[in-house]
Image (cartoon, rainbow, N blue to C red):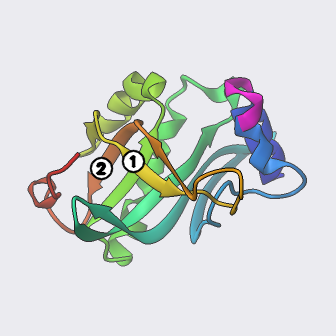
């Protein structure tokens, strides 16, 4: 059910975006450690995945809860369901991470900024994000570099403790 949800949610943004969810796979890179799934009478309504990991910001190793696999069923977009993701706050506190971190396409800037009105979310642009490809390929380099919007949510520390860097 989750794989179908992601195919329908991510497919309209490009066939390539739906490809990781072929068959019954419900994750695109690393499998989420935790998931928040919203249901209604029609099935999966919304989803957010979470995975603790270390990221490096200009040489500083930083523990974060990486948020990803965010989606809202297309017929529910614009109804404010994304604000229910704030229900993850107690879980983030329990995980004792200093920050939650995520990336989104620049086209989602207004959406993310609306989401941030209900809590301390910082949106950073002009940041290059280098990540390891989910599957080793001989015809591609092992990492990719993207310029998404970076979203940072202070959890156990203040935003002033976020390392500076591009």
| Disc nearer the start of the sequence (2/1) | 1
Q: Nearer the viewer, residue 36 or 103?
A: 103
Can residue 41 be seen here?
Answer: no
Q: Quadrant of residue 49?
A: bottom right
Where is residue 122 drawn, in percent x and y?
Answer: 24, 42
Q: Which residues are magenta?
A: 12-16
Other-residue count near label 1 (Cα within 10 Å), few / some / many at <14 / 14–19 / ≥20: some
* Above or below 56: residue 152: above
Q: Nearer the viewer, residue 163 or 5?
A: 163
- The residue positioned 37% from the left and 60% from the top of the image is 89
Can residue 155 be seen here?
Answer: yes
* Above or below 35: residue 5: above
Q: Quadrant of residue 162?
A: bottom left
Lateral position of residue 86 relative to residue 20, left or right: left
Q: Magenta span has 14? A: yes
Q: Magenta span has 140? A: no
Residue underneath mark 2: 152
In the structure shown, which secondary structural element does the residue marked by tag 1 occupy?
A: strand
Nearer mark to the viewer, of 2 and 1: 1
* Above or below 100: residue 18: above
What number is the disc on residue 129? 1
């Amino acid at each position: 059910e989750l794989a179908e949800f992601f195919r329908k949610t991510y497919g309209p943004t490009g066939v390539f975006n739906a490809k990781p969810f072929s068959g019954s796979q419900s994750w695109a890179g690393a499998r989420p450690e935790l998931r928040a799934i919203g249901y209604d009478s029609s099935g999966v309504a919304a989803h957010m995945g979470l995975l603790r990991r270390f990221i490096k910001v200009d040489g500083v190793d930083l523990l974060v809860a990486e948020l990803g696999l965010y989606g809202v069923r297309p017929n529910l977009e614009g109804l404010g369901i994304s604000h229910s993701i704030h229900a993850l706050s107690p879980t983030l506190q329990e995980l004792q991470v200093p920050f939650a971190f995520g990336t989104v396409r620049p086209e989602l800037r207004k959406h993310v900024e609306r989401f941030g009105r209900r809590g301390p979310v910082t949106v950073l642009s002009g940041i290059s994000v280098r990540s390891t490809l989910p599957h080793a390929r001989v015809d591609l380099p092992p990492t990719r570099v993207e310029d998404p919007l970076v979203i940072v949510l202070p959890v156990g520390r203040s935003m002033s403790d976020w390392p500076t860097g591009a």
